[in-house]
Amino acid sequence: AQKITQTQPGMFVQEKEAVTLDCTYDTSDPSYGLFWYKQPSSGEMIFLIYQGSYDQQNATEGRYSLNFQKARKSANLVISASQLGDSAMYFCAMREGSGGYQKVTFGTGTKLQVIP
Amino acid sequence: GAVVSQHPSRVICKSGTSVKIECRSLDFQATTMFWYRQFPKKSLMLMATSNEGSKATYEQGVEKDKFLINHASLTLSTLTVTSAHPEDSSFYICSAREGTGIRKTQYFGPGTRLLVL
């Protein structure tokens, strides 16, 4: 089974509209962290937002928010008021384990294109 | 789906020693491989991009003599941290892509935790 699943290979959104990028995960570890990264065409990975498995509230960072539904094992990224510069690949990732025994798993990414 | 493995998953070494991390694509030919370093505040920094058979392209600020990258075959890339120091302690993640087109899917390894004492 896939540890991280991003079911949307590509998405379009109108500028200034909100968009939700889906991410579901699978783990039996009670302690884990969920990340979203943005990858522009340059290849760099830009950290957007983090959600810990024990965090009570959904994480928010500016225009980014993470819709964390623990029981459903989903961690969707919501981008509000889309901008042309938001066009990029977006990766969801999960980090499991603790101390030196950690493992990170990335999804296959969603390519977001913002339309003017 | 495609699988990328990293070995070792965890390594502890003394300051001044060199450490080699392997990244393998298990069921596809990775024309391009990437090496990232994940910092404590979760940011993921691209260190270098390597294409099979050619020299790696390092990002600005990354010392190529310290972080040696070898992409000798279509399924294997290695990152050698030479003369490691405690500040090199980090989580290193490799990624592989089949083909050179940016539309190709990029697959990530599970990461290697390096601790330099």
Image (tube, coloured by chain):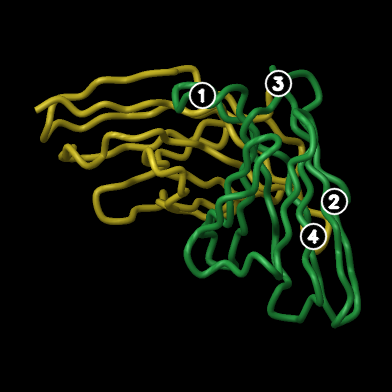
Chain colours: A yellow, B green
> Hey, which quadrant is residue B109 in on the image?
top right
Q: Which mark is residue B9?
A: 2
Residue identified by numbered label 1: A6
Question: Mark 2 Cα within 10 Å, few/some/many (few <14, many 20+)?
Answer: many
In the rendered structure, the answer to whether residue A36 lies left or right of residue B26 reads left
Residue at mark 2 shares a chain with residue at mark 4: yes
Position in image of residue B20 (x %, y %): 85, 57
Q: Amino acid at mark 4?
A: Thr
Q: Is A66 situated above or below A62?
A: above
Which secondary structure, mark 3?
A: loop
- Which of the chains bears the disc numbered 1? A
The subunit carrying tag 4 is B
Q: Residue at x 45, y 28 (%)?
A: B102
Across and down, in percent, residue A29 comes to 76, 43
Label 2 to label 1, Cα distance in Å? Answer: 25 Å
Q: Are marks 2 and 4 in contact (CB under 8 Å)?
A: no
Kindly report which numbered mark, 2 or 1, lies closer to the viewer in this rendering.
2
Q: Secondary structure at mark 2?
A: loop
In the displayed structure image, the side of residue B81 where residue A73 appears, left or right: left
Numbered disc in front, either 2 or 4: 4
C-alpha separation, residue under disc 2 versus residue under disc 4? 14 Å
Q: Secondary structure at mark 4?
A: strand
Q: What amino acid does circle 1 point to?
A: Gln
Query: Mark 4 = which residue?
Result: B80
- Residues marked 4 and 3 touching at CB (< 8 Å): no
Q: Chain of mark 2?
A: B
Q: Which mark is residue B13?
A: none
Q: Is residue B58 above or below residue B90?
A: above
Which structural element holds mark 1? loop
What is the C-alpha distance between the residues marked 1 and 4? 32 Å
What's the residue at 32%, 37% (across, down)? A78
